[in-house]
Amino acid sequence: MRILLIEDEPGIARFLKQGLEEEAYTVDVADTGPAGLAQAQAQAYDLLLVDWMLPGLTGLEICRQLRAAQHAEPLIFLTAKDTVQDTIGGLQAGANDYIKKPFHFDELLERIKVQLRPLPASTEQFTVGPIRLDVATHQVFRGEEEVPLTQKEFALLEYLLRHKGKVCRRQSIIENVWDIHFEYNTGVIDVYMNALRKKLRLNKDEDYLQTIRGIGYVARD
């Protein structure tokens, strides 16, 4: 597995590169925003670790440009920022996860493993209203039109459709979709639900992904 680490602090970069290589990952390092973006565009990586604050180009802008160019590899932010607004901004830009500095290497390692975990083979399909999700091909359609989703958006929609008609509690969604089993701000779910509804073009007359206030969400025909 090849990882691109975009980090401008030499000490942190050396520590992470050594630790990841000891875990059998191949690690390339870029120390500026423009260099990291160019490297990510030029070569295929299994995962990107991106510092938020970088010289020349922020990690947030790197993420936005890669997602706009249809790069779908998992991206984890390494950030000293800790406000909900910053977290939401990063996830809206297309990041898969983030970890706050300072962090334990073991926690970062587990988050990497979650993102690189292979999807099980399946021929299952799930529907709600005009929406169809194909697990095997990792595609979502509204009618005959394919709707491109990020990996996390797809996982969230799949979880709701697998439990269609049942209320999915917020903590259950965080544990099963984000694989986070500790106290965590579940507001991130709202960000992804809003993105899903917009991409699927769901309006008030097509309330197939319903909010159960104070509890969670439910997919209903």
Image (cartoon, rainbow, N blue to C red):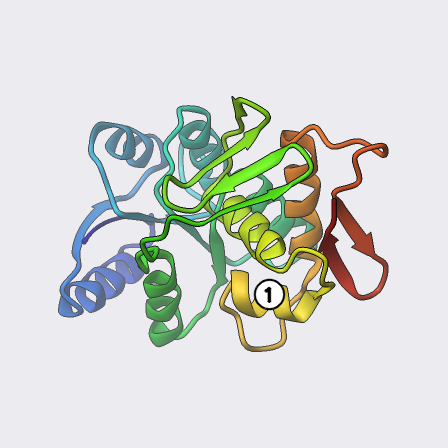
Residue 18 is left or right of residue 120, and the answer is: left
Q: Position of residue 6 (x, y in %)?
A: 32, 46
Residue 59 is left or right of residue 173, and the answer is: left
Tell me the element at label 1. helix
Residue 64 seen in the current view: yes
Query: Where is the N terminus found, in terms of image quarters?
Result: bottom left
Neighbours of disc 1 within 10 Å: few (<14), some (14-19), many (20+): many
Give the amino acid at mark 1: Ile
Residue under pointer 1:
174
Q: Kindly indicate the quadrant of the structure image that contains residue 83.
A: bottom right
Residue 149 is left or right of residue 120, and the answer is: right
Q: Position of residue 200 (x, y in %)?
A: 64, 31
Q: Which residue is drawn at 74% across and 42% down?
A: 208
Residue 13 is left or right of residue 142, and the answer is: left
Residue 5 seen in the current view: no
Q: Residue at x 52, y 70 (%)?
A: 180
Q: Nearer the viewer, residue 155 or 9?
A: 155
Q: Position of residue 143 (x, y in %)?
A: 59, 25
Q: Kindly indicate the quadrant of the structure image that contains residue 121.
A: bottom left
Q: Nearer the viewer, residue 186 or 12?
A: 186
Q: Residue at x 33, y 49 (%)?
A: 7
Q: Where is residue 26 in the image (x, y as percent from the top left)?
A: 15, 54
Establish if 48 lies above or below 114. Answer: above
